Amino acid sequence: MNLHPLEFEKPIIELEAKLAELRQHSRANDINLDSEVRRMEVKIEETKRSVYENLTAWERVQIARHPSRPYSLDYLQFAFSDFIELHGDRLFADDRAMPGGLASIGDHRCVVVGHQKGRDLKENIKRNFGCANPEGYRKALRLMKMAEKFTLPFVALIDTPGAYPGIGSEERHISEAIAVNLREMMVLETPIVSVVIGEGGSGGALGIGVADRVLILENAYYSVISPEGCAAILWKHRKHAPEAAAALKLTARDLLDLKIVDEIVPEPFGGAHHDHPAAIESLAAAVTRNLDELSQLSKDELLAQRYAKFRRIGEFADDMVMG
């Protein structure tokens, strides 16, 4: 059973609890309640379809933030193999919110970096709630350059509400660190695959998000600002976050339609937090397939396609009348 049910999942949880009680009553009293059990099972499946096939943008944001969802280190442990973590940016410190190192996936030896959140308060403090400091992005850049030097593909796992906005982060030039990554990733002479596995928040996500293939899990989101932040600016209150989420077009389907991402990676029914192994298998298959395709390209083809990909993003009008 889901230990952290979301508000819209509570009708399902209540029905599952009633089903468990019905089965327990049947066993305890040696009563045949098979027909009632089957009816309850059908009702649960119908409720699940009604809920999960009609999710709003805000509900998908809640799934993307679910504390039981697989995090980067979960994927590194089970989707990848032979992971060897490498530490430090060689300038200031080792950012625990941005682990990375050498790993293998499919037939590919690669360099992989990802944002990492914590599952409890102690780990969240250690991982800074998945919000990397400048040294995290500089460590990522160091590992990108290492990947380029040794002709290894680079894989990024994105899951952050945003880069850390604290005073120390600003003093160590967080904006500059992200901007340098954007520039260097655009011309990095090795294949890059980025996957938004949960939250894709603003520049914190984009700092490791410039890639030949940008993938996104079905219930993840990618946005210039959080729904709460948008609501606070436009509606002057965070209670309007659901409307903001819809307006931001931040869901996987919206992003694919807008050509911001290249592929949606399917999740288990109801979200990755319901079935870690299935989610991990789905991500591994998608990353491996894209690396297989990118490895067939020459460096010139790779860079040309990456440039063209980002040039295609957005819509332009040249018939506007200036008044």
Image (spheres, rainbow, N blue to C red):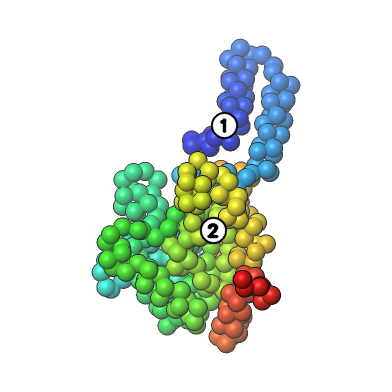
Which residue is situated farthest in the bottom direction here?
A: 300
Q: Nearer the viewer, residue 179 or 266?
A: 179
Q: Which disc, if any, is residue 87?
A: none
The residue carrying mark 2 is 222
- Mark 1 / mark 2, whichever is N-terminal: 1
Please, is residue 282 above or below residue 305 in the view?
Answer: above
Q: Is residue 46 left or right of residue 127?
A: right
Please, is residue 298 above or below residue 249 in the view?
Answer: below
Q: Nearer the viewer, residue 315 or 67?
A: 315
Quadrant assignment for the C terminus: bottom right
Mark 1 vs mark 2, CA separation in Å: 26 Å
Q: On the image, which quarter does residue 34 sit in?
A: top right
Quadrant assignment for the N terminus: top right
Residue plotted at (65% across, 56% down):
253
Q: Nearer the viewer, residue 238 or 311?
A: 238
Residue 186 location in percent, x, y? 50, 78
Amino acid type, mark 1: Lys
Helix, strand or loop under label 2: strand
Dot in front, 1 or 2: 2
Residue 214 location in percent, x, y? 57, 67
Q: On the image, which quarter does residue 288 sit in?
A: bottom right
Q: Is residue 135 left or right of residue 47?
A: left
Helix, strand or loop under label 1: helix
At label 2, counting other C-alpha atoms closer than 10 Å, the crowd grade (few under 14, some 14-19, many 20 or more) is many
Asked if residue 248 can be seen in this view, the reply is yes
Residue plotted at (31% across, 52% down):
126
Q: Which disc, if any, is residue 10?
A: 1
Asked if residue 73 can be seen in this view, the reply is no
Q: Are marks 1 and 2 in contact (CB under 8 Å)?
A: no
Please, is residue 45 above or below residue 215 in the view?
Answer: above
Which residue is situated farthest in the top direction here?
A: 29
Residue 144 location in percent, x, y? 42, 75
